[in-house]
Amino acid sequence: MATKEISPVQAILANDTFAFAIKRLGQGLIVIFLVSILSFLILKLSPGDCFTELLANPSTPKKVVTQIRERLGYDKPLFEQYFFWLGNTLQGNLGSRCQGFSPVTPLILERAGNTLIMSLASLIATWAIAIPLGIFCAVRQNTWVDRSVQVLSYTTQAFPSFVLAIILLMVAQNTSLFPVGGMTSINHSDLSWWGKILDIGYHLILPTMTLTIVGFAGLQRLMRGNLLDVLRQDYIKTARAKGLPENKVIYVHALRNAINPMITLLGFEFASLLSGAFITEYFFNWPGLGKLLLQGTLEKDVNLVMAGLMLGAVMLTIGNLLADLMLKAVDPRIRLEEME
């Protein structure tokens, strides 16, 4: 009897991982929807709006302010304003700013891209340093190298990011080795395509150093602690008793289990890529999303702030999903049903 062939689409739909991803995305959409309602209500019910300062200025005609409010839909009932905003957002239109009526969408995308450049650079640098260093210190536990790294970790973790940013800015100003702030040089537009990349990378050094120095300490200690816990397990002792090479015991058997919590943490790191660098952006005058959202909050610009909050909620949903999928890929013994 001939077996019935399954089409690629049917195979994908029947895949447990695909079903899990769809379910998680559905849950994420519900969370994003609830976050949007709560955020919109808090912003709208807070005292004042973006027109408060205009109304307080005697030289501003109230008729002009009224026309602007009608143009942006601020004169409608609260629930109508929300569904008007939601409908536009689903169509990719995040509205206009109160100040200048510039569209929010291209501004948010530009600033989010700038923040991602800095956050991804620091994320790669932090993990590239912290994970190997944590493994090395766990394998060489209680040696002078391990103790020196732990002292360095505690010292750097005690440093607030703004203090470290100020110190690095002072070094840059006194040595002229690095740019004091900003994302590009004055002649950036005159440079070649490759020159523009190098220019941005040059301005990226100090912000990346700030985030990396502050972030690597906790990550290194976590990796070290996880690996030490696994190395004390009975199955590791059994593997050593059987005469397996030490490198195989550590890097094949122990590390696979020790890395699992780090995979979960990486998902949360992805979720915070757009929100974890505000202080660094501020001190290094980096034109990122954090500075823009602070400005929008001070101006009570609902469309701008809502765009940033929704982008953060989407990143959180995607980050959690990626963490679960990476965890499953690294350790096939984990069942997706256990993550529900």
Image (cartoon, helix red, strand yellow):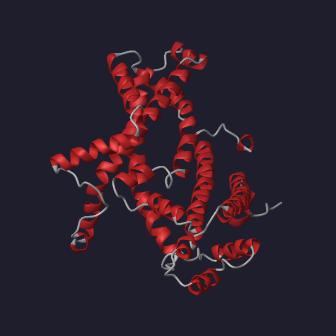
Answer with left or right where residue 104 lies relative to residue 88: left
Residue at the extreme top of the image, as rendered: 241
Q: Residue 111, image x and y in percent?
A: 44, 65
**Is residue 247 or residue 155 the one in the foreground?**
155
- Image quadrant assignment for residue 110: bottom left
The residue at 50%/25% (across/down) is 225
Answer with left or right where residue 100 lies relative to residue 67: left
- Image quadrant assignment for residue 304: bottom right
Q: Residue 313, image x and y in percent?
A: 62, 57
Q: Is residue 259 above or below residue 36?
A: above
The residue at 43%/39% (across/down) is 215
Q: Is residue 256 above or below residue 109?
A: above
The residue at 37%/38% (across/down) is 129
**Is residue 59 or residue 36 the one in the foreground?**
59
In the rendered view of the protein, which quadrant contains the N terminus?
Answer: bottom right
Q: Residue 144, image x and y in percent?
A: 32, 17
Q: Residue 109, image x and y in percent?
A: 48, 68
The residue at 54%/85% (across/down) is 61
